[in-house]
Amino acid sequence: MLNSDYVRVEHLSHRFHLTRKIAIDALKDVSFAIDRGEILGLVGESGSGKSTVARCVMGILKPTGGRVIYDGIDVNAAKLSRDENVRLQKERQIIFQDSGSALNPRMSVRRILSEPLDIHGLSRDREAREKLLIQNLDFVGLDPGVLESRPGELSGGQRQRVSIARALLMKPKLIVADEPIASLDVSIQAQIVNLFKHLQAEHGFTFLFIAHDLAMVEFLCDRVGVMSKGRLVELAPTRQLYDSPQHPYTKALLAAMPIPDPRRERSREIPVYHAPEYVTRQEWTRVGFDHYVLMER
Amino acid sequence: MSNLLEINDLSVSFDTPEGEVQAVRDVSLSLPEGKVLALVGESGCGKSVLCRSVMKLLPRTAKIKSGSIMADGVDITNYGERDMRKLRGRMFAMVFQDPMTTLNPVMPVGDQIAEAVRVHNRRISRTDAHRRAVEMMELVGIERAEERSRLYPYNFSGGMRQRSVMAIALASNPRILFADEPTTALDVTIQAQILDLFREIQATLHTATLFVTHDLGVVARVADLVAVMYAGRIVELGTVEDIFYDPRHPYTWGLLQALPAWSRGRDMLNAIPGMPPSLIHPPRGDAFACRNPYALGIDYLEQPPMFRISETHSAATWLLDPAAPKVQSPIHGGPHAEQ
């Protein structure tokens, strides 16, 4: 599963120290790779470590074990050249779940979008910048009229579009989206997922999409990884994962997907998955083409 | 079967510096005993405001402009805080979205449930209240309740927290339960269990539930009746079968089609274009017209009345007028039929 050298997550572990005595292992030995131009989905229950993976990939958190290699650069290396640093900052962008707190409420959309350009000293010419801003707003389906608005005046869907526009401005090669649609209405979720699909086809960036809505992931992603209790338990091409899930947790997740059909939905039993309290030795096993499962030995 | 809750032509507005926000407009609903009614719609369409205006939990800037609210045959439209306090708990109880912010983090869960019992029944002793709290925990499916009643919310998983919140809500034997997106903060595997719990409680305690959600998958599992709201109005009302197997309003079609299950194997999802209108100056005519691919000329001029389709089913769209052109519903045969 580490056959790509674009983004490699190798034996990533992270431990949060809550108090002096209590620590939580948020990530335990997670490894995967993302190919250039691929959309990789990461699903799992809340608290399974999905967001911690996103934060480690972005270098927001320094993992306590393992490493993240982005295009040959170790994201958490103690010393990086100036050039490598700039590349990491520009080429990786993140979109957060709650656009309400990801955007500064006191800044206008114009300032929110201009800030990354200022930091990197890009498009300083006034007219060129205006054109660039309008073009990027257009990518995400927003009217230039929102430039003077503040986040509080926009709806949740519009704010999430501003976050996406801010990420796109840097012409990123890797976008990490941490539950970007979880706080939106179903109809707006569909709009944003369509937008991601369209933008990815147009710009060809690599995409790590984190979600707990399995139906949306099935629609958007090329490959899907399933996480449970800090471990990656299954990784497979989307069709394969949905057609023949192997790990009991994946099976439970898929079975719990609601069916919008009252008669069928009510007539079925939903299995409950209890994670084993004590984990025996587990090992990654290849069960099909590009399909890996964490199995007990 | 009697209606526990009856809302007639209710309109609720908020005073804001920008003008009057007409959050709920001419809503009529009735909720029979022992049924779950789901209120569905996008955020900002007035679902929560409708719930809270029955409970009288709205801020001071809100005003009931017209209409009436009848709870178990009594008109409570003009009830003040003092009267409402007697009804809350005994008549109404509410389950909120996020169980972590609803529960007191520094108080054992059992004590919190016992507190709810004692508030509504002053004469009960502490030991009896605790016993009742443990009973309630068992009722909502918390195993080893006696032991767990001494634990704190942070010891509980998300699903168990939401069960505890339901135990608090049910502790005072309410007739009507309001649930405002109670499963949104939970994982899918837990969500189904909580929804089933709602149905079980319905069957054993004969309460009536008003269930607010934007997720039609949830509606399919939990609801008996469905009211679809858009821009402060109810646009379609029917049994769960009416809404899923024979929807008539283009907005209901849009909501159903936006579900990924409808787009299996296709390139793009069927999103509803645009977004709900501002309720400060709601558009003339049908508020959904500008997002509606089936809009007729009259939709931009005049608000459609509720057309009756059957005993249980009605919808507010001009497409149901005898003079309207016949439009084939895009929803037929269920989401998997087109594969």
Image: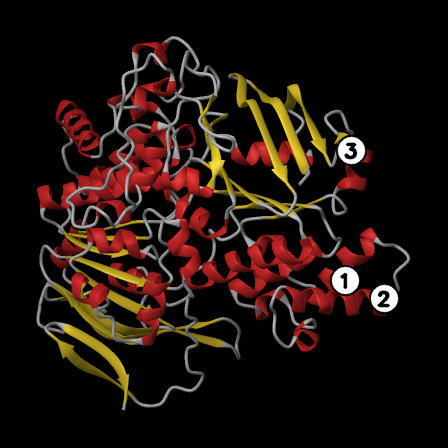
Q: Of A180 and A237, which appears nearest the observer?
A: A237
**Badge 1 is on which residue?**
B114
* Discs 1, 2 touching: Cβ within 8 Å: yes
Q: Secondary structure at mark 1?
A: helix
Q: In the rendered view, does B73 fall on the left or right side of A46?
A: right
Q: Position of residue A178 (x, y in %)?
A: 31, 54
The answer, for residue B35, to whether it is visible in the render is yes
For mark 3, name the chain. Answer: B
Q: Position of residue A266 (x, y in %)?
A: 44, 56
Q: Residue at (35%, 64%) from the top-left corner?
A: A255
Provide the chain ID for the residue under circle 1.
Answer: B
Residue carrying label 3: B81
Query: What amino acid type is highlighted by mark number 1?
Result: Ala
Label 3: which secondary element: helix
Residue A177 can be seen, yes or no: no
Q: Quadrant of the C terminus of chain A?
A: bottom left
Q: Quadrant of the N terminus of chain A?
A: bottom left
